[in-house]
Image (cartoon, coloured by chain):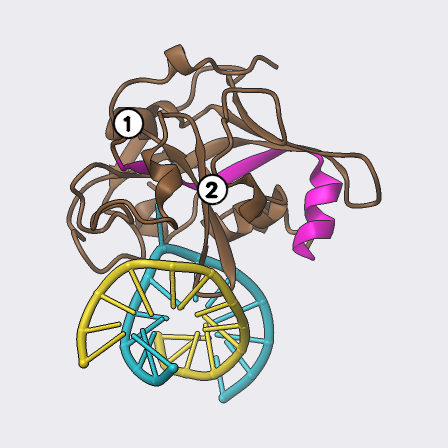
Chain colours: A brown, B cyan, C yellow
Amino acid sequence: MRRLTRAELPIGTSALARFLIGKLLVSEYPEDGITGGRTSGRIVETEAYPPGDAAGHAFRGPTPRHQALYLERGHAYVYLAYGTSLMCNVSSEAAGVGAGVLLRALEPLEGIELMEARRGTTKRLDLARGPGRLAAALAIDRSLNGIDLCAPGRLWLAAGAGKPGPIGRSPRIGITREVDRPWRFYERGSPFVSGPARLRV
DNA sequence: AGTGCGATTGACT
DNA sequence: GTCAATCGCACTA
């Protein structure tokens, strides 16, 4: 498994969102107990929140909460939504420019049993289908906010085994502004993609 | 200092 | 399909 270098990440938020389909997300929790170990999955669904996007968290300028979105591309931005679900993003522009790519779904690869334990279900399709479930399956929490996903650590990006299948795109899910922008990317036909059936073909 | 609101999920009718 | 849970924080005053 080869870690992605920053130079490999395309410049531009939408380009990065598309590029990440078929890549791997790896979580390496210290093996200090029953919840420790390595989990990973293939990224099958992303959403781009480019600079100037009214639906993006960086739209109103930098604040302490959104600071990680302003890091050079390839850093993690983790936040809590609805008081219940953690979301994991990849910062996507030059340092000082606020933008990100939301990771919405994984096809589980390694550490299936660990994911099952963390998620409280053995339904493989549901382990990491949806941004909150993805974060739970890989034990992503706010302590990872701001870390470099191109460096050794608790969470990082890796190259995929093969080339991804055909990539579809659609409007983004669950937002109230800029609802018509086709900035969601997904692997066509994958059962691990979230959203209604019509948004998975 | 108080208020409103989510880039969702899971339980329930 | 509907709906409440639950929390940090940005925004207003």
Any part of residue A189 in sight: no
- Above or below, A164 against A131 in this view is above
Left or right: residue C6 versus residue B4 is right
- Above or below, A89 against B12 in this view is above
Q: How many marks?
A: 2
Instruction: State which mark lies toward you, 1 or 2.
Output: 1
Provide the chain ID for the residue under circle 2.
A
Residue A124: x %, y % from top left: 63, 45
Left or right: residue A156 versus residue A182 is right
Left or right: residue A139 versus residue A34 is left
Looking at the image, which is closer to me, A165 or C11? C11
The amino acid beneath tag 1 is Glu
Which residue is depicted at the point 54% across and 36% down? Answer: A107
Residue A10: x %, y % from top left: 31, 17
The amino acid beneath tag 2 is Ala
Give the CA distance from mark 1 to mark 2. 22 Å
Q: Secondary structure at mark 1?
A: loop
- Quick one: label 1 or label 2, which is nearer the N terminus? 1
Quadrant containing the N terminus of chain A is top right
- The residue carrying mark 2 is A105
Which residue is depicted at the point 26% across and 47% down? Answer: A56
